[in-house]
Amino acid sequence: MSVYIELFLAFLQIGAFSFGGGYAAMPLIQEQVVGKYGWLSLSDFTDLVTISQMTPGPIAVNAATFVGENIAGIPGAIVATFGCILPSCIFVTILAHFYLKYRKMAMLQGILGSLRPAVVAMIFSAGLLILIPALFESGAVSFIAENFNVRMAIWFAIALFLLMKMKWDPILVMVLTGVMELAAQTIIRFC
């Protein structure tokens, strides 16, 4: 099968089944690009998540563009991105029509309410998929000294404190933790 067809179908599935936004899509993206096709390693996937969050636009679309470009250049980026957004365009058009027609219906409100717990679970799962490889070198939870990344755990704790208690802007927290890691690596390199 052509790589363009594989890219299109992989991101078509991601676009069709990733309800709840970019974080909810992360487990699906990982399954396709790391597990099924092996286009990225787990470490590369973590970098992909970081890059997708830092660039403007939806995370899933940024991921599709990044993976497509890595695998098959600009045409691959276009094909993967189109595959990712096509289901949303179709679903939103159909849903908008029916929502405007039936928005006051109790059954519709019940369906939307029942999707919330699943979306929260997918977002939590995506957070773990990002957190575990960042904190544990092997990608598996193990508190052996060689496997546990203390510095990343400290950055995580600081970021969590600044976001939750101090209510800092997430972009400012990302920049700050990036600067702290850069400073730590510079100090380690010269000491």
Image (cartoon, rainbow, N blue to C red):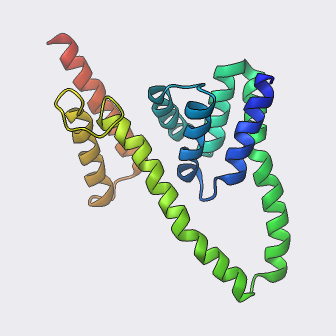
- Depth check, front residue: 170 or 150: 150
Q: Relative to 49, say whether 162 is above or below.
A: below
Choose top left, top right, bottom left or bottom right for residue 137: top left
Residue lying furthest top in this view? 190
Give the residue at x 36% y 43%: 131
Give the residue at x 76% y 53%: 88
**Residue 81: percent from left, percent from top:** 73, 37
Give the residue at x 84% y 64%: 94
The answer to whether residue 66 is left or right of residue 46 is right
**Residue 26: percent from left, percent from top:** 54, 45
Q: Relative to 95, say whether 11 is above or below.
A: above
The answer to whether residue 165 is left or right of residue 12 is left
Q: Quadrant of the N terminus?
A: top right
- Depth check, front residue: 64 or 37: 37
**Residue 33: percent from left, percent from top:** 60, 32
Q: Relative to 14, say whether 10 is above or below.
A: above
Q: Quadrant of the C terminus?
A: top left
- Depth check, front residue: 42 or 84: 42
Choose top left, top right, bottom left or bottom right for residue 139: top left
Number of marks in the image? 0
**Residue 38: percent from left, percent from top:** 58, 26
